[in-house]
Amino acid sequence: MQSRHMTRRRFIKLAGAATGGALLGSRTALSQSPMTMPQGPGSGSNAGGLAPHGEPADYTLRIGTGLVEVGPQRILSTATYNGQFPGPLLRLKEGRRVVVAIHNDTDTPEQLHWHGQFLPADVDGAAEEGTPFIPAHGMRRIAFTPGPSGFRFYHTHLRAGPDLHAGQYGGQVGPVYIEPKHEPGAYDREVFLTLKEFEPFFMRGGDMAMDFLSPAAIVPDLKEQAEKAEQGASSTPKGYEVGYRLLTINGRMLGHGEPISVKRGERVLFHILNGSATEIRSLALPGHTFKVVALDGNPVPTPVSVPVLWLGTAERVSAIVEMNHPGVWVLGDLADKDRSQGMGIVVEYAGRKGKPRWVKPAHSRWDYTRFGRAGAAVAPDEIIEMTFAKQPAAAEGFNLWTINSVPFDMGKMTAMFHLRRGRRYRLRMRNATDDIHPVHLHRHSFELTKIAGKSTSGVIKDVAMLGAYQEMEVDFAADQPGLTLFHCHMQIHMDYGFMALFDCV
């Protein structure tokens, strides 16, 4: 079990949690990033490693204990970057090398993962891939060329297990925006929002929204397999799940902190990050729609306006909202309980005052294929079959998760799949569980090619939600040599088996 001890006490008044997480800029356009970039070990965005001794850092991040004022008389002590939550917004330039000094002021070795970037294994920030730890009370200075362009983020990448003070349960999350080399603006300003829960606790079982994914095609044999596993464990209590007492946007509960101030006629680009350790989140703004222009930082082929956004853990959505419905509104989660616990932020039009209003939108489904192109994607060179299953409460009361019947072994950390560099692979994923899994592939992006039997192309992501008893296929080009980690991004799932390593030669 990992633990943290306060090394220094600094009271951080986050009157600008909107400063670290809701930084506003003018007319910086979205990236046009491909699924993968042709790269070599020492070229393009793949270049990286330790910075030469004495080379000054462009950015400094300090991992330590900070205080986050989430609400009136609600001040939390948690692990943070630079003493704040969210961590500072890093605006990087596509193709421009950067040096980052990462200091670890805690008593525990740490990892900092550059989620969504194409980086070498020793920089990516995962011990399973071979990234060196940032030693306790030590530092690591790294250099890399950012890419691909778009909305990325950084976060800790430690196994937490039963320790709810470790890993992604704390406040180690920060946004990254990699500005493309060339593009015009298409909006008036940006707002960055990081969704995050605090004060986690364990419970037996729990409810997860299931009816929002579309198409909702259930594969009978997957459901049968899951039901057999549940029946075989019917005499044991349900496995532990995680709940939360406090929910925040940019580290503030609904009603605490400054509202997002807007003017009628503005086109605001919201960059929204689900920084949760385990939760799937929804967001709606009464009287408005979200024109989704990018998923996980990658522009979508078909921008579509939707009334509700859904984000699995670690997913990002970039969406333009036309401010054409004056008033004072709550931008918040669909669940009344979650908004009451803080998952919301006030949007206030200029010249309008009063109590913020919430109006629940009509039911809608979240369908990745709406943002793609019709028809099949390019045929892959090879198909890799993956079946995800659950052994209820089999790991000291926690659910044990398997890929092709094998849980990941943190002791051995051997590669399950072997890739040849330059080939295009299709992951055919089958979910024989009653959970939704936001699956993530490190150091690559992938193209969604089939979801619940429906073919699509052009949607590029690095995390995608696979529904209960459903199938999904994604393609990626194996252009990053060495070890690459694949896992469910829910902390409690990856900690208890839901990981696998690819080895590319």
Image: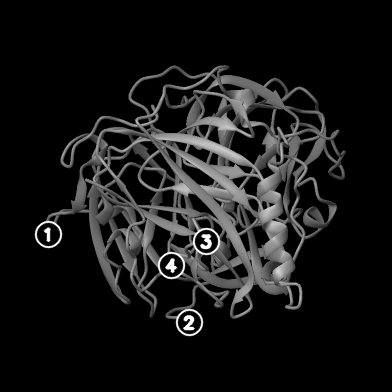
Cβ atoms at labels 1 and 4 below 8 Å apart = no
Q: State yes or no: discs 3 and 4 in contact (Cβ < 8 Å).
A: no
Estimate the spatial distance between the alpha carbons at disc 3 and disc 4, rounded to whole Å.
19 Å
**Residue 194 visible within the image:** no
Q: Is residue 289 visible?
A: yes
Q: Earlier in the sequence, mark 3 or mark 4?
A: 4
Q: CA distance from mark 1 to mark 3?
A: 43 Å
Q: Quadrant of the C terminus?
A: top left
Position of 62 with respect to 236 (left or right) is left
Earlier sequence position, callout 1 versus callout 3: 1
Which of disc 4 and disc 1 is earlier in sequence? 1
Q: Which residue is denoted by mark 3 in the rendering?
A: 402
Amino acid beneath label 3: Thr
Q: Which residue shows up at 32% across the image and 35% down it? A: 93
- What kind of residue is marked 1? His
Question: Camera-side residue: 367 or 379?
Answer: 379
**Which of the 4 image quarters holds residue 291?**
top right
According to the picture, the residue beneath numbered tag 1 turns out to be 53
As drawn, 237 above or below 423: below
Q: Nearer the viewer, residue 66 or 309?
A: 309
| Image point (60%, 33%), residue name | 451
Position in image of residue 285 (x %, y %): 76, 36
Q: Considering the numbered disc 2 on the image, is that residue within a helix, a strand or a loop?
A: loop
Relative vertical location of residue 428 with respect to residue 85 in this rendering, above or below = above
Identify which residue is drawn at 41% across, 57% down.
500
Q: Disc 4 on helix, strand or loop?
A: loop
- Pair 1/3: label in front: 3
Along the line of sight, the residue nearer the viewer: 414 or 153: 414
Secondary structure at badge 1 equals loop
Instruction: Specify the amino acid type for callout 2.
Output: Met
